[in-house]
Image (tube, rainbow, N blue to C red):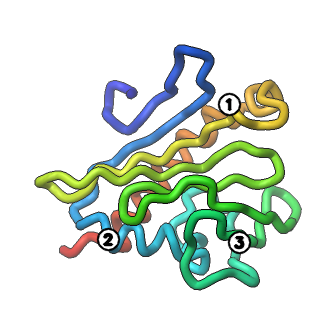
Amino acid sequence: MSEDGTGGTTTGSGERVVSAERQIAAAPEPIFDLLADPAAHSRFDGSGTVKAARGNPERLSLGARFGMDMRVGLPYRISNEVVEFEENRLIAWRHLGHHIWRYRLEPNDGGTLVTESFDWGSARFPPFYEWVGYPAKHEVNMAKTLERLAELVEVS
């Protein structure tokens, strides 16, 4: 974890994971409800690349497949599959590149500690992600995503 507590790169034992975490003043359920709703992803995406859901289930579950309209320079479509799922605690998905986006929710007295991770250890060609600088870019974008999640669920 970085010194400011927002996340950091996990290394050791060959892992290729970068994460950000944030304490959110809300129970895990409303946070997870957003994560499990593909139509909500563009509302909290901190990268600005997720534009819209397409042809998706209303709620994600283990093995669910869902599509997104994306834009990084040019528009494109991506299909994802939920590969990890524990209601109100963990959800993760991957697509063709086989890297994984993971959200872990840990309830505590102040609400929920939410950790978002980009795991490229299972990617088809991990050095590509390092070459294009995704780990550092994603760490910044994940912090923005967690900020947006907090704005959507925290009660003032």
Q: Are marks 2 and 3 in contact (CB under 8 Å)?
A: no
Query: Quarter of the image containing the C terminus?
Result: bottom left
Alpha carbon distance from label 3 to label 1: 22 Å
Q: Position of residue 42 (x, y in %)?
A: 60, 72
Question: Is residue 78 shown left or right of residue 45?
Answer: right
Residue 84 versus residue 7: which sits nearer the camera? 84
Q: Position of residue 63 (x, y in %)?
A: 65, 64
Q: Residues within 10 Å of mark 1 (few under 14, many from 20)?
A: some
Q: Quadrant of residue 61?
A: bottom right
- Name above or below for residue 76 compared with residue 94: below
Q: Position of residue 28 (x, y in %)?
A: 30, 64
Instruction: Give residue 29's mark.
Output: 2
Instruction: Identify residue type, mark 2.
Output: Glu
The kind of secondary structure element at disc 3 is strand
Residue at 34% x, 63% y is: 150
Residue for badge 3? 66
Query: Quarter of the image containing the N terminus?
Result: top left
Q: How many marks?
A: 3
Instruction: Identify residue type, mark 3.
Output: Phe
The kind of secondary structure element at disc 1 is loop
Residue at 68% x, 66% y is: 50
Q: Residues within 10 Å of mark 3 (few under 14, many from 20)?
A: many
Residue for badge 1? 121
Instruction: Identify residue type, mark 1.
Output: Gly
